[in-house]
Image: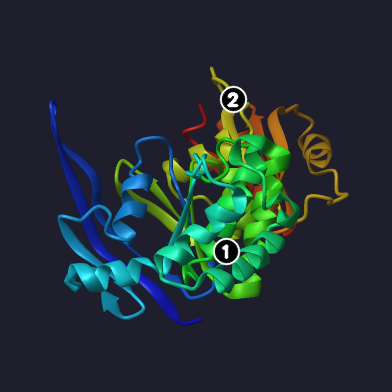
């Protein structure tokens, strides 16, 4: 795929009462045209600052943001406004005009662009149909659920005919079932309109459900970049491991013993991996947690296992498990 977005050595600082805050530090990555790309990190990692730098709502202190061959930093105000029209954003808070009907909300960006009223109404109804809310055209935002409001926000963005869609924690205020439906809608829009989607979130489940590739941010720095599949199977940094392990909300303190993570290439594997391990070495192990995740529509399982305190025995168990080609095994030193 052709490159659409290139971020090079991006840095951004803010002044606060406590001093200089380094929000981004030398961040670089590329996003291909038509892909769904994830930016993930815990609170304070620099995600929101990064996404605002992509459309220059925040001007970086240094570095480059190149979109479709143009350096955003070199554009004058007029050209920057035109470029921003091709970059749509949806937020956690929906940002709808509460006094206007749903139809008027979707018409608004087209009216601003100078499209005639008849064409505006026709296109708005088409986009409401795309998001499944054509029958709500005459309703007001206060009459809709959170998921419906987010669908209206998506329809309004589509009305701007964007090439890029930035989703800044767009599902954080929604329940799991509604989140899944919104993510499915975003995937459908990506495929139908070939819109490049950038998903900003702190939730690993969102990244696993929708993204092809992603970066992990920690304290304003790029900690890791990979495909979502490889990130799940082989997280290389403590930042990535925390996000993956914490996704089950079952992380607990360890007082002793070595811990390994087993990632199953197929979640429905019928091989009794742990039972075979116990039978082979005649020693018990402690299953700390296990779960199944959806990664781009495919189920993937993981399990955290505490091994015996005997280091030699633990080494033999790890070597034994690594012979199994249907699983990935890695020792975890920062499981807390």
**Nearest-to-viewer mark from 2 and 1:** 1
Q: Nearer the viewer, residue 26 or 235?
A: 26
Residue 325, image quadrant? bottom right
* Discs 2, 1 touching: Cβ within 8 Å: no
Which residue sits at x=36%, y=78%? 68
Vertical placement of residue 204 versus 298, above or below: above
- Is residue 259 visible to the viewer in this orientation of the structure? yes
Q: Which residue is mark 1?
A: 212
From this view, report whether residue 204 is shown above or below residue 164.
above
The percent position of residue 100, horizontal first and vertical second, equals 54, 46
Going from N to C along the chain, the mark reached first, 2 or 1, is 1
Q: Which mark is residue 261?
A: none
Give me the C-alpha separation between circle 2 and circle 1. Answer: 39 Å
**Residue 198 x, y percent position in the rendering:** 48, 59
Image position of 267 (left or right of 37):
right
80 horizontally vs 48: left or right = left
Residue 217 percent across, percent down from the top left:
38, 47
| Residue 309 marker | 2
């Amino acid at each position: 795929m052709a490159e659409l977005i290139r971020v090079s050595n991006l840095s951004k600082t803010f002044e606060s009462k406590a001093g200089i805050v380094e929000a981004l530090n030398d961040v670089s990555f590329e996003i291909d045209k038509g892909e769904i790309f994830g930016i993930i990190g815990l609170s304070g990692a620099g995600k929101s600052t990064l996404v605002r730098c992509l459309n220059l709502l925040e001007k970086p202190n240094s570095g480059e943001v190149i979109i479709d061959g143009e350096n955003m930093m070199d554009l004058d105000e007029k050209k920057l406004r035109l470029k921003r029209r091709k970059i749509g954003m949806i937020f956690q808070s929906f940002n709808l005009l509460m006094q206007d009907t749903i139809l008027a909300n979707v018409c608004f960006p087209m009216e601003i662009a100078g499209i005639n009223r008849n064409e505006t109404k026709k296109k708005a109804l088409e986009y409401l149909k795309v998001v499944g809310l054509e029958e709500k055209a005459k309703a007001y935002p206060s009459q809709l659920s959170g998921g419906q409001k987010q669908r209206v926000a998506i329809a309004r963005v589509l009305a701007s005919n964007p090439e890029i869609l930035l989703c800044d924690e767009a599902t954080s205020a929604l329940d799991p079932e509604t989140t899944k439906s919104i993510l499915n809608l975003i995937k459908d829009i990506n495929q139908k309109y070939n819109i490049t989607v950038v998903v900003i979130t702190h939730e690993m489940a969102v990244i696993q459900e929708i993204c092809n590739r992603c970066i992990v941010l920690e304290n304003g720095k790029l900690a890791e970049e990979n495909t979502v599949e490889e990130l799940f199977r082989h997280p290389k940094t403590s930042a990535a491991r925390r996000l993956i392990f914490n996704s089950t909300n079952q992380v607990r303190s360890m007082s002793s013993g070595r811990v390994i993570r087993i990632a199953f290439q197929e979640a429905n594997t019928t091989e009794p991996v742990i039972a075979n391990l116990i039978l082979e070495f005649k020693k018990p192990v402690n299953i700390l947690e296990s779960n199944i995740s959806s990664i781009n529509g495919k189920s993937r399982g993981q399990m955290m296992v505490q091994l015996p305190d005997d280091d030699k025995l633990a080494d033999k168990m790890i070597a034994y498990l690594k012979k199994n080609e249907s699983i990935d095994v890695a020792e975890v030193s920062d499981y807390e």
